[in-house]
Structure formats: structure tokens, C-alpha cells
Image (spheres, grey):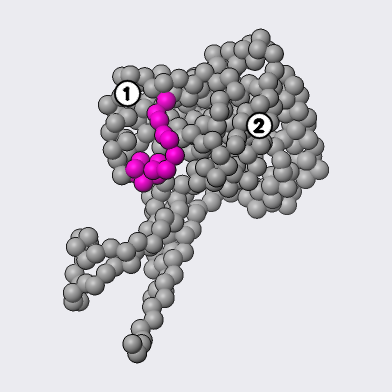
Amino acid sequence: MLMSTTDAPAETRARSLSQASTAVPAPWPPGQGLEELWLLGQPPLSRLLEFVEDTAIDADKVDRAALATEWRVANDHYMELEKTEAGIANQGTHRELDPRLAALADEVAAHPHFRRTFDTLPTTFGMVELDSLIVYQRHVTRNFVDARMARIGAAPGVEALFRVCMPLGEPEAPVQIQKVGSRRYILRSKSTDFRFHEPVLLRGEQLTGYDSQGAIAGVVGLVVGFGSNFLNAVRVGNRVLLNNGYHRAVALRALGVTHAPCIIQTASRVDELQISVRSRVADEPELYFESARPPLLRDFFDPRIRKLIPVRERTRHIEVNFEVKDYLVSE
């Protein structure tokens, strides 16, 4: 079973949470070029050092000792937060979905992307408090957050906010597809949500715009695309962990939005976590759901924790190969 057990005095929790929920976060300084917004102080340190080595601009000039010192100071700060904000993750003011959004929620729930993604665990729509969402993703791209903020605009209306969190349109990031061999293809996109979906067996009548050489017996498709792109989270007890939609959540909070529409799955056992969240969460659930003070989305706005790292532009490549064997078998 999974439980949230740590607590601090109720007065301390209420005061800290109230301050976090009402204040508009201070923006990070303007950047030049592509930058990654990192949460320092979260183990393992080696992950930060590897990221900088592989991705940072002029990585060979980075002072690793100074970076480790920054991480250590942030780690000390987290240990202090475990005392002053113990149990704060249990006190989020999450609430039911605004009744004005019921019809839009029904539209999303009827969509194939929703039905395929949220078909196993108990699932509801709700309004999550952004500050108190637990986060497992240690970094977001500042430029993506800034671009989201510009598209959303100040003070989005309730329906516009729902559409931001629950988009049903086509993905915004373009995809390049290149044939690089007779049976080899490479697909490229700048989106961090770009991924291989699954192999699928199709019938001939499911194809459009294809003129075959003869009758079609079957089609084997290798599907590459994007995730459902809904803002969604997993609830364990009183704690809620953000599962998808990090750039939007940070952008909304930076705009002063405190609560956002969200799809919430409920898990009560480790086995359920293993099918609903990334493996790093399922592998160490105690950090997120039982520790005194796990990393929270509000930490992206804490200058004692966050660090802007200039990085090189990256593109996600997905290579698809296939093999065909044709032979006779005696029955």
C-alpha cells in the first residue's frame, strides 16, 4: 500500500501553503538562446553533471566543482524545507472541476486519445493547485515555457484555460520524415513529447490514398507520434504528482494562475503506479509519496533551487527499421 505519512504543525503548513498559493511567482531573468531551467539539490547529482556534459553550451568549460557546490547548497535547502514545510504536499487545495466545464470535460472523455490513455485506473477531472503538485521532472526548457506564456496570454478565461490544459487539436511541433534506406526511416521533431507508439495490424479498408499492386491481406504499421498531451496527474492519498504537462503548468503558474483543470488518476498500490507514471517514480515511490517534503512545482520559482543552464538545440530522432522474410514451410 502507498500512504502519505509525514506531517508538520497545522499552523505552519497552512501559512506556507497560503503564501505559495496567493503570491505571483517572481519571473526568472531573461535569457539569451536556449536555456534549461533545472531544479538543483535533487539526487542524484550525477544526473545533473551528465546532462551538462552532454547538452550544455561550452560544456568543457563548465566548472564541475562549482556546479557541485551549487547543487549541495540547494540540497541543504531542501533538507531545511523538510523541517519547515513537512507535510505541505498533503495540504494542496485541489478541488472539483468548475461546473461550467462539464460539457468540455465530456468532450475530452469521449475522445479516442483519452479512452486509450486512461483506461485502467479510476480517473476524474479536477482543478489542481499548481504550487503543491509533486514533480519528478527535474528540468523544463525556459524557452518553451516563455512561448507557452505568450500564447496563453494574461488572465485566460475559464474555458480558454481548459483548452490549454486539454487540447484536442493537432500537435504544434512539425515532424520531418526521411527514407534513408530501402527498409529504414528516420523521423525527427523538436518536441520532447515525440515518441514511438506501437506496432499495429490494419485491414486494407483502413487505408486511404494508397493504390496497391493487388488485393491487400493486411498492413503492419509502426506508429510514431505524440502523447495525448493532456495535463494529467496521479493521486496517492492526499498527494498529487504531475505526470504530464510540465511546461504548461509552469507557464500557467508564472502567469499567476493558481489552479488548473487536470485529469487525475488515483493509485493505491505500487503496481498501479507502474502502469501510470514514469519508471523513476515507480522505482522510488517513497521519495514522492512518503517523504516529508518532496520536490514541488513551486520550486521552479525559488532562486535558491533553480538554475538556468544554456544548452544546445536538440532534435528527437526516431529510427524505424523493418525486416521481411519470405519462405515456404511444409505442413
> Is 4 rendered above or below residue 314?
above
> Is 141 rendered above or below residue 157?
below
- Specify the quadrant that holds the N terminus: top right
In the image shown, does 178 or 275 lie closer to the viewer? 275
Residue 219, position in %: x, y? 29, 68
> Is 11 rendered above or below residue 141?
above
Along the horizontal axis of the image, is 106 left or right of 26?
left
Residue that mark 2 sits on: 290
Q: Label 1 near label 2: C-beta < 8 Å?
A: no
Q: Amino acid at mark 2?
A: Glu
**Which residue lies at the image location 81% right of the left edge and 43% below the top edge?**
65
Which disc number belongs to residue 101?
1
Report whether residue 51 is seen.
yes
Residue 184 position by quadrant: bottom left
In the image shown, does 89 or 76 lie closer to the viewer? 89
Q: Amino acid at mark 1?
A: Leu
> Is 50 rendered above or below residue 3?
below
